[in-house]
C-alpha cells in the first residue's frame, strides 16, 4: 500500500520524503481546500516535483475547491500546466472542472477528493464514467463498507488513516459558512467545531463538545490491506514539518513490518486518538471535549495575547514542558486553531521565589 503524506510547505514536503512517504499531496496558491496552508507558488511547485521525482516519490496536487463560473478557465489552464510539469495526479471536487479536464487535458490522471462524498457502488459507477482513477473515501466509512465497495469497482481506493476528523460528513459541513461566512468547500474553513461551547441543561466532560479526536488506524493496517485499499493517507497540510516527519516515520515502520512506537504519535500535536467510524459505527470516544495536547504536557494556563493577524484580543492556551536536562518547550494555541511551538536550551539555575 502507498503511504501518502501531506505537504503544506516545502519544509513539510522534505520531512515527508525523508521519513519514507511514497507520495505527497500539496496545493498551489489557488483552488486548494487548505487555503490557510503556506502552499506552493508555481515555481515552488515545479521545484517540489523535481525534488520528489528524483527520489522516486509521487506528487498529487489538490485542485479541490468548488469553482465559480469565472474561475473555470483559469483552473483549466492551471491543470494543463500541471500536466506539462509532470504531476502524477490532481485531486478534484468540482464536477464541471472534471468534465472540462476530460475534454481538454485527457491524459491527466484525476483523483476524486473526499469532499465529493463518493461512498457507495452507484457513486463509483458515475465516477468511472468520468474517468476518475482513484477515490479518496469519506472518513465515515467503516471497514466492511470499504471492502464491499472494493468488490464492486476497479477504481483505486484511498483511505485516511491518521489526522483530524470533521464533525460532519466529509465535504458536507456548512457550519463555517453559516457562522463565519467562510466556506470549507472554498478552502476557508474557520473550524468553529474546534471552539469551546457552553452546553445548558446537560453535563459534559469539557467545553469542546463539537471537536472530534484525531483518527489513528495504525493498528488496523492489515485490515485495510485485506480490504484492497491502495493508498493510506495522512491528514495534515496545516501541520508542522515536525508533525509530518514523526507521523510518516511511524507509519512507514508499521507498513514495513519494523518495530515502531505508537506512543511517538502522541509526542506531536494531537487531540487524542480514536478509530472513529472504522469499526463499523461511531466510536464512543469520538469527541475530545478538551483542547489539543501533547504527551509531555505538564501544566496549562489560560492567557490572552494580541493576534498578529487582527487588532483584537483572542483567547489562547499556553503550556510548557519543563524537565531537567531537556530543552524548554513552550506551546501556544489560539481560538482560531493557530499553533506555535517554541523550543530551546536553558541553563539550569537555582532560583527562589520564582514560579511558572
Image: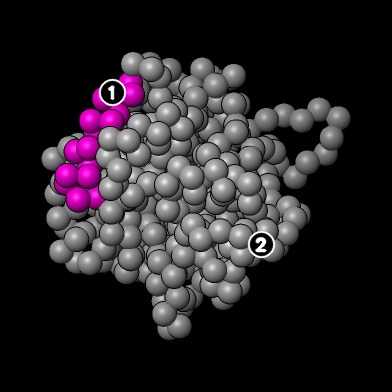
In the image, residue 150 lies at what x, y percent?
58, 62
- Residue placed under numbered mark 2 in the picture: 148
Left or right: 4 in relation to 216: left
Residue 284 visible in image: yes
- Few, some or many C-alpha atoms within 10 Å of disc 1 (few <14, some 14-19, many ≥20)? few
**Residue at position x 68%, y 55% from top?**
277
Left or right: 59 in relation to 120: left
Residue reaching furthest to the bottom: 258
Magenta-colored stretch includes residue 317: no
Q: Which residues are magenta?
A: 71-87
In the image, residue 12 lies at what x, y percent?
29, 53
Q: Earlier in the sequence, mark 2 or mark 1?
A: 1
Q: Secondary structure at mark 2?
A: helix
- Few, some or many C-alpha atoms within 10 Å of disc 2 (few <14, some 14-19, many ≥20)? some
Q: Secondary structure at mark 1?
A: helix
* Magenta region, main secondary structure: helix
Is 341 drawn above or below residue 305 in the view shown?
below
**Residue at position x 57%, y 56% from top?**
215
Find residue 47 and name its label: none
Quadrant showing the N terminus? bottom left
Magenta-colored stretch includes residue 85: yes
Between 329 and 14, the one lying in front of the other is 14
**Residue at position x 63%, y 40% from top?**
169
Is 222 drawn above or below residue 78 in the view shown?
below
- Residue placed under numbered mark 1 in the picture: 73
In the image, residue 267 lies at what x, y percent?
46, 62
Amino acid at each position: 500500500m502507498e503511504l501518502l503524506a501531506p505537504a503544506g510547505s516545502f519544509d513539510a514536503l522534505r520531512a515527508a520524503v525523508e521519513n519514507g512517504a511514497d507520495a505527497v499531496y500539496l496545493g498551489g496558491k489557488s483552488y486548494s481546500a487548505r487555503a490557510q496552508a503556506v502552499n506552493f507558488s508555481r515555481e515552488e511547485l515545479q521545484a517540489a516535483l523535481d525534488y520528489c521525482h528524483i527520489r522516486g516519490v509521487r506528487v498529487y496536487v489538490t485542485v479541490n475547491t468548488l469553482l465559480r463560473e469565472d474561475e473555470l478557465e483559469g483552473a483549466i489552464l492551471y491543470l494543463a500546466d500541471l500536466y506539462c510539469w509532470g504531476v502524477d495526479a490532481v485531486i478534484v471536487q468540482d464536477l464541471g472542472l472534471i468534465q472540462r479536464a476530460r475534454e481538454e487535458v485527457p491524459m491527466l490522471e484525476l483523483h476524486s477528493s473526499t469532499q465529493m462524498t463518493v461512498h457507495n457502488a452507484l457513486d463509483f459507477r458515475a465516477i468511472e464514467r468520468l474517468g476518475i482513477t482513484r477515490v479518496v473515501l469519506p472518513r465515515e466509512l467503516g471497514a466492511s463498507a470499504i471492502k464491499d465497495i472494493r468488490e464492486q469497482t476497479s477504481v483505486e481506493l484511498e483511505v485516511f488513516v491518521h489526522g483530524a476528523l470533521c464533525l460532519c460528513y466529509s465535504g458536507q459541513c456548512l457550519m463555517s459558512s453559516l457562522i463565519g461566512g467562510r466556506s470549507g468547500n472554498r478552502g476557508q474553513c474557520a473550524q468553529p467545531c474546534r471552539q469551546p461551547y457552553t452546553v445548558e441543561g446537560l453535563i459534559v466532560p469539557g467545553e469542546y463538545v463539537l471537536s472530534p479526536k484525531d483518527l489513528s488506524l495504525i493498528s488496523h493496517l492489515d485490515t485495510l490491506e485485506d480490504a484492497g485499499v491502495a493508498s493510506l493517507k495522512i491528514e495534515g497540510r496545516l501541520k508542522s514539518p515536525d508533525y509530518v516527519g514523526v507521523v510518516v516515520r511511524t507509519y512507514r515502520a508499521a507498513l514495513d513490518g519494523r518495530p515502531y512506537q505508537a506512543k511517538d504519535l502522541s509526542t506531536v500535536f494531537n487531540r487524542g486518538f480514536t478509530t472513529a467510524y472504522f469499526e463499523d459505527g461511531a466510536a464512543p470516544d469520538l469527541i475530545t471535549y478538551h483542547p489539543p495536547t501533547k504527551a509531555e504536557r505538564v501544566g496549562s494556563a489560560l492567557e490572552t495575547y494580541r493576534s498578529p493577524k487582527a487588532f483584537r484580543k483572542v483567547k489562547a492556551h499556553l503550556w510548557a514542558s519543563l524537565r531537567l536536562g531537556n530543552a524548554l518547550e513552550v506551546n501556544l494555541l489560539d481560538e482560531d486553531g493557530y499553533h506555535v511551538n517554541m523550543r530551546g536550551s536553558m541553563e539550569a539555575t537555582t532560583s527562589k521565589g520564582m514560579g511558572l
